[in-house]
Amino acid sequence: MAKHIFVTGGVVSSLGKGLTTAAVGLLLKRMGLKVKLQKLDPYLNVDPGTMNPYEHGEVYVTEDGAETDLDLGHYERFSGDFVTRDSNYTTGQIYQTIISKERRGDFLGKTVQVVPHVTDEIKRCVLKLADDETDVVITEIGGTVGDIESLPFLEAIRQLRYDLHSRNCLYMHLTLVPYIKAAGEVKTKPTQQSVGELRRIGIQPDVLIVRTEKALTDELKKKIALFCNVDREAVIVEKDVDHTIYEVPLMLIEQGLDELVAERLSLPVGRPRIRDWIDMVETVKHPRHRVKVAVVGKYIEHQDAYKSVYEALRHAGIAHKSKVEIVQLEAEELEKKNGVKGLAKIKPHGILVPGGFGHRGAEGKIAAIRFARENRVPYFGLCLGMQMAVIEFGRNVCGLTEATSGEFDPKSAQCVIDLMPDQREVTQKGATMRLGAYPCALAENTKARAAYGAEQVSERHRHRYEFNNQFREQYEHRGMLFSGLSPDGRLVEIVELADHPWFLAVQFHPEFKSTPIQPHPLFRDFIGAGLKYAKDHQDAGMVGTSSEARGPE
Ligand code: GLN
């Protein structure tokens, strides 16, 4: 029978609950257990697919095509295992299920209520992951304890301990111990109050993970344990990391969280095997080289909007024992203010245009891509970043001066990016997105094939528009290489330029499959090309292998 760990958060949001959940997942996996991770989100949207990245950050896409919370990205990057759509449920989804059942008459005339109907549905979503092959299910409850909307979730997990027996369930609560500068002290009161709030609804946490800026004294830990009614060794301190988020699991192991969980849940396992993880963290701490990548996007201000892209760039840096310095550029500013001059001033060693929706900033992205192509700066385009590269090449190389995307101007005669003919009739936009994993066949003697070292790969998608096949010949004739196609040859998946040091763009989202232990091959080669560019241009004042790059961040 699977055991359950429930992770809740208190005091404030954005404490890194998702990261901590992922780190615990890694520990248990490396102890030889089969672990499944899950996030329950209290908002009413059915999924984050329709939410603005400013609202919610990145939408993470799973293999099976679910649009989910970005914390699932942490789960996959840490555990190295793929999650599915069952790993993310929202209040909206839960209510949708209950209301459809009610309309079908499944409740046989009964009054449908939050308790027991909503709580039962939440329990069903948790238990769905607890199959015969799973040893531990870790369920993270979104939001902060004390919020009105997370109450049904907390009630459901309270009941689960009763249903499944206390020896099979463990409550982990993440809180903040703030440092008050004026008093020169850290304060435990918010933690006490948050635990009090949990106890009021019947949940006594077994483990407290306290987020702090500074290390805590033993005395303070004792105080927290005493007033929160947890064992002294169950107060785990998660201090802000110095170098990388990938230090978190090591910090938890140092304090014996792995042993504590194993003991509490009676799991017959040894300590985690994490040599490779330790080595990886060491690599991050002591980079040998430095490479500067400009990311030209539309939601640059929101630090979580391109989370997986930034992480994948860092992973690629690890593969080269290098630190990737990411310079974030707002595409619209590039378009309206100083154009590519601003970009040239930064002297990037690589330029990346990530995915996105809508016209805003498109011209800035196209200008940045032209700069990369003409100046032979390595370029990597992701999804919309590929579509923009195709438009740029159309306009400036193929003489298609009006080249555009059907997303921006559906009536244009030069929609080099467009809906596929069979999609054009479908009016309901939400129904037409290509989502999740699709195969891609790679052509011989291309950069894509060299990077992957395979004939066929599978990557995740999230888009409606595709390369318009009417223009394929014209593009090929002018030197664009279609190095990745759907196996039936119908859809263009990867384009590249043969006469450029590294110019490659993909219709999919490779960033979702990169992990620090297994950096994605395309990101790895992009950063490799960036390092080469930095080295070749050292005379031009580029920061390449300088001594400055050797110290910690
Ligand atoms: N907006 C584009 C499309 O729908 C690209 C989407 C993306 O970058 N994820 O095709």
Image: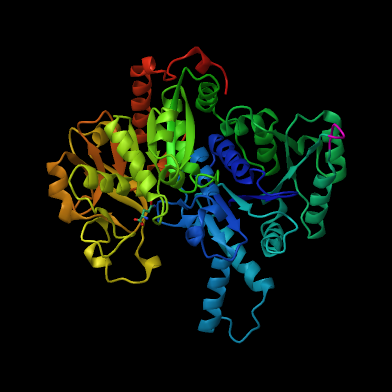
Please count the marks in the image.
0
Tell me where residue 490 appears, x and y as whole percent: 19, 54
Q: How is the image coloured?
A: rainbow
| 524 versus 469 height, above or below | above
Tell me where residue 163 appears, x and y as whole percent: 68, 61
Relative placement, left or right, of 491 versus 129 is left
Instruction: Please name whichever residue, 149 or 419, is drawn nearer the observer in this view of the structure.
Output: 419
Tell me where residue 553 appears, x and y as whole percent: 57, 24
Name the residue: 26% across, 65% down: 411
Figure quarter occupied by ligand 1: bottom left
Instruction: Please name whichever residue, 267 or 125, is drawn nearer the observer in this view of the structure.
Output: 125
Residue 239 visible from this viewpoint: yes
Q: Main secondary structure of the magenta part?
A: loop
Relative placement, left or right, of 196 versus 318 is right
The stretch in magenta equals: 182-186
Instruction: Please name whichever residue, 264 or 539, is drawn nearer the observer in this view of the structure.
Output: 539
Name the residue: 24% across, 35% down: 449
